[in-house]
Amino acid sequence: MSSPSAPSTGSAASESWPWPPAMRASAAVHVAALGAGVLVPGAWPWALGAVVLNHALITGAGLTPRSNLLGPNVTHLPEAADARREVAITIDDGPEPEVTPRVLDLLDAHGQRATFFCIAERVQAQPALAREIVARGHSIQNHTAQHRHNFSFLGPRGFAAEIARAQDILTDVTGQRPTCFRAPAGLRNPFLEPVLHRLGLSLVSWTRRGFDTREGDATKVMARLARNLQARDILLLHDGNAARTAAGQPVLLEVLPLLLQRLRTDGLRAVTLPEGLKTA
């Protein structure tokens, strides 16, 4: 579980990437396996097995959105947010003209703030809506340029092109350069973290999610979000690609009023990620 503050974009590019312990261990396994296969007669089946197991573990980490084995991964706000009674509502895959303006009205009515992890090409298509998100006190962060379904299979160049392009679009449209990144579906591979480090971005996943792209029952979505809800939580919802209720409404529009009322009852304050990630 990790909750670092957002990095400084000015220094990240000049610093060398600190290899996570899991990646150092993986490199050691490969070196040891190669050495054993060359120097020890009959050891190659064991060496090959060790490499295969290592790759399986690395793949499993990439398929686990909240894992920090491949590098830093923010799953909670820092401890300082506990005393401030802060949570972060994060809303993915927009902006969506049918949904996002109504979400903004709900947030305004309750005096709460959110972070929108936006797909940059959608921001490019809806620049006025993106600027309205920021003008109303919310934050827009990087959710890639296209939200490619094969994102987790990209290599370093593919990651860099997709994420840097999104950075440029979001900055040009909103005037604010993102400091946080979320991968599509939270899936990734070991090549992602060095790219994020170079671009000065923090990987942010979530504490709990409502599965609101698949579940159209607002009561069930809310139950998942509210279970053990507490300060420092990062909550995941969707304005884009949202499931529909039985009445045909995007489920977020029924869940959000329930969630905002619950925050008020519990004395919790929803803040943007840049605000919530402050350590003092």
Image (tube, grey):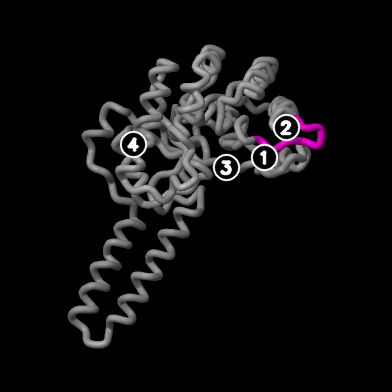
Q: Which of marks 1 and 4 is in front?
A: 4
Tag 1: amino acid: Asp
**Which of the two labelled residues, at mark 2 and mark 4, occupies the earlier sequence position?**
4
Q: Relative to 267, does residue 4 appear above or below in the rendering? A: below
**Which of the two labelled residues, at mark 3 and mark 1, occupies the earlier sequence position?**
3
The residue at which mark 4 appears reads as 161
The residue at which mark 3 appears reads as 207
Label 3: state its secondary structure: loop
Tag 4: amino acid: Ala
Give the magenta part as a residue range.
Answer: 242-250
Tag 3: amino acid: Thr
The residue at which mark 2 appears reads as 255
Magenta region, mostly helix, strand or loop? Answer: loop
Label 4: state its secondary structure: helix
The residue at which mark 1 appears reads as 212
Disc 2, disc 1: CB below 8 Å? yes
Q: Quadrant of residue 219?
A: top right
Q: Where is residue 23 in the image (x, y as percent from the top left)?
A: 33, 56
> Quarter holding the C terminus?
top left
Residue under the point 47% across and 51% down: 67
Q: Nearer the viewer, mark 2 or mark 4?
A: 4
Disc 3, disc 1: CB below 8 Å? no
